[in-house]
Amino acid sequence: MAGHSESRLRSQPEAAGFRRFVLALWLPAFCAAALTSQAVIQFDVFLGYDWIVPQASWFPVVCEIKNDGAPFVGTVELDGGRFNSGQSRRAVVELPTGTLKRFVIPVFATPGGFGGWDVRLLDERGKVRAEQTGLQAKRQIAPNTPLIGALARTPAGMPVIRPILPQEALLQPASARFLPSVFPDNPLVLEGMDCLYLNSERALDLKVNQVNALFDWLNGGGHLIVGVEQISDITATPWLRSVLPCDLNDIRAVQEHPELQEWLRNASWSTNLAGLARNRGASRQGASEPRPGVSAADPFSDLPDDPAFETVPLQVAMGALRDGRVVVTAGDKPLIVTANRGRGRVTLLLFSPEREPFRSWKNLPTFWAKLAEVPGNWYVAADYHQQGGWSSDSIFGAMLDTRQVHKLPVTWLLLLLIVYLVVIGPLDQRWLKRIGRPMLTWITFPCYVVFFSLLIYFIGYKLRAGESEWNELHLVDVLLKGEQAELRGQTYASVYSPSNQRYRLEGRQEFATLRSEFAGSYSGAQPGEKATILQEGDGSFKAEIFVPVWTSQLFVSDWWEPAPVPLIVTVAPQGGQWQVKVENRTERGLADARVVIDDYIMTLGEVPAREARTFTVSKAKGMRLSEFVLRYGSTFQSAVRGRQRTFGGSEAGRIDDLPNGTMAASFLSRLSEAQDSTRHFITPPGLDLSSVAEHGNAVLLAWAGDYSPVKPLRQFNPRRSSKNTLWRVAVPVK
């Protein structure tokens, strides 16, 4: 017993030492786990342009993730909430310890879609590490409402646009403030912005990728407004110095500058009212009637002076003009200079609108309204309202939808219904009564149901069954960039599936994204296409789409790709005619080429592959652009309506003349002008070239059949397929 007690006494110190050893190992692990749990992931999401979302346009969703915990590979998942649960977008990002990552996810805003967006951060196991749900824009604006972005020096320097008379919130022009750190580096998501104000002091804060995206946006039709803060801001920023139309070398005080006031009063306001209508039967009193002597071209001819502004000298930058034209001068000193840059333009303010006396000018909101090209009509009458419209996507759907599917005419459907009712009713009753077996109705009625069900299936199979089919149509804008070109493409792709099937798509361009067909405001249906889009790297994507049995669905890929110049076009006047030279550097001949000059469209003819042709054209042999659009676009509305009907004639929802139909769709706003307001179509930015032609450019439209300038989206082999391309090149008339 004594030995046993002695052994137990010796074991107690050993057990205590073992417990202390375990505690020594456990305590650091516990503290590390506690510290890790306290290292909360910072997950911020910035929606749209300062939480402003323009309809029918791509907009940026900027995600910012800061990880102070253990490293992991995260997946950011974004979906449209309960309003668009079939669409989800994802981006994979590596998150080492102590890193801050920012990236952009392009999202398309459907007209009238006021739902929220859900954004979640998942780890490798699918666990939600952070989330932002129910995100909603502070404002949604109509597709034609001016939106000005701003990289201002201070928050107080933000452009404030004069409110318009119509009270509809969707029409009120908007300004959105950007921070340089979250300015998008993807040109596709900048297209929803009409113009951008850049204070020269902020130019130094932009990174190379952001500057490249800004250049692409400008070249594609954007309007860059630069305010000069200091000369050193320009000289220290080579990219900004290269894009400006002046070489600046000094800043001087200008004592008198009444010309700015006169510029706001003169008749040079924009009067573009695409997508708008006046309320019928509106009051003829009040703001609906323009003031005497005021028109849409000069809505502020009676604008009052601001004596306090005129008495303070204005600091103005001086220099030599390289190109462009002077818009406003004070005496012989330029104040505002503008110059074309590709399809866009840059406007140089040779002063800082964020410094005195300009920032206290009573008419500063009117100044920004004119720079942003707010239509003057909105300042002379209040009875304008946002007009609904059909979706321009539906036009291309009517061109590309499979011709294998046929619709059952309503008369045949009614006849089949009548036969069914007659068979299960009077015919069945008389037959069973005649043979004296009325109780057999418990057998005959199910037989009738089975028979007619099989008959309906057989009819549906004959009408809708077919082979897998993929049809692509590319609208490609050629934007010159030095010796190279930027291709801005819109790929409309229709896929028909003979069974419930998932298909893989891939966009390999430098910037590319995918969306489903959007429904115009005249259609109450929400997009029903199901797709999962994975944005990869800087801009390419991979996607998986689901297509139900016997249906044809439309998807749209917007992309941006640098490439060698495919077409070189020059236009020069020659008396009362024009000489047009087209050099085709592609491997596919141009079957049908036309040129738009001075509001006329003229036929050029064929241009073989790897050859150049020179044509002489005149208005006498051409057609007014509005007449051309009306001739080939007059069936657009009926085709869109017929395509949306479940029953009826199949031909009603088809457009078979693809070359002319696609060319007419490139000037859809002209169709609204030529027809009544119910024929208005909602178009995404970049589709309509009317404004490009109206600014004095010639526009070449060239059709290349059975040709694609990029690799196909599809990653599967359909039994049937087609591909066509419409080249669109805008050049100045020399």
Image: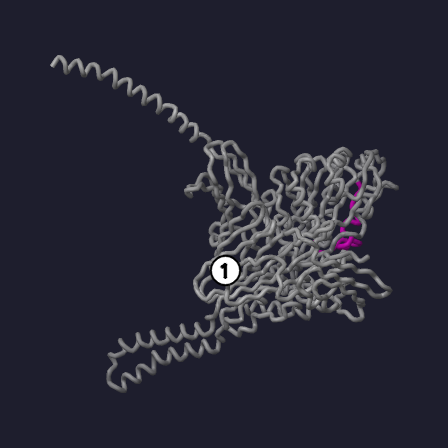
Residue 118, how many percent across, how many down? 49, 46
Quadrant where the C terminus sits is bottom right
Q: Nearer the viewer, residue 367 or 2?
A: 2
Residue 63, how many percent across, how many down? 54, 41
Q: Nearer the viewer, residue 373 or 186?
A: 186
Q: Residue at x 78, y 71 (%)?
A: 621
Residue 26, how many percent across, how many down? 35, 25
Identified by mark 1, the residue type is: Phe
Badge 1 marks a residue whose secondary structure is loop
Q: Is residue 293 inside the magenta stretch?
A: yes
- Residue 379 in sight in this render: no
- Residue 422 in sight in this render: yes
Quadrant where the N terminus sits is top left
Q: In the orientation shown, which residue stands out farthest toward the left? A: 1
Residue where numbered disc 1 is placed: 716
Q: Which residues are magenta?
A: 285-305
Left or right position of 406 against 286: left
Q: Residue at x 42, y 43 (%)?
A: 126
Q: Is residue 168 inside the magenta stretch?
A: no
Left or right position of 398 against 165: left
Left or right position of 297 against 32: right
Q: Residue at x 55, y 55 (%)?
A: 515
Give residue 385's quadrant in the image: bottom right
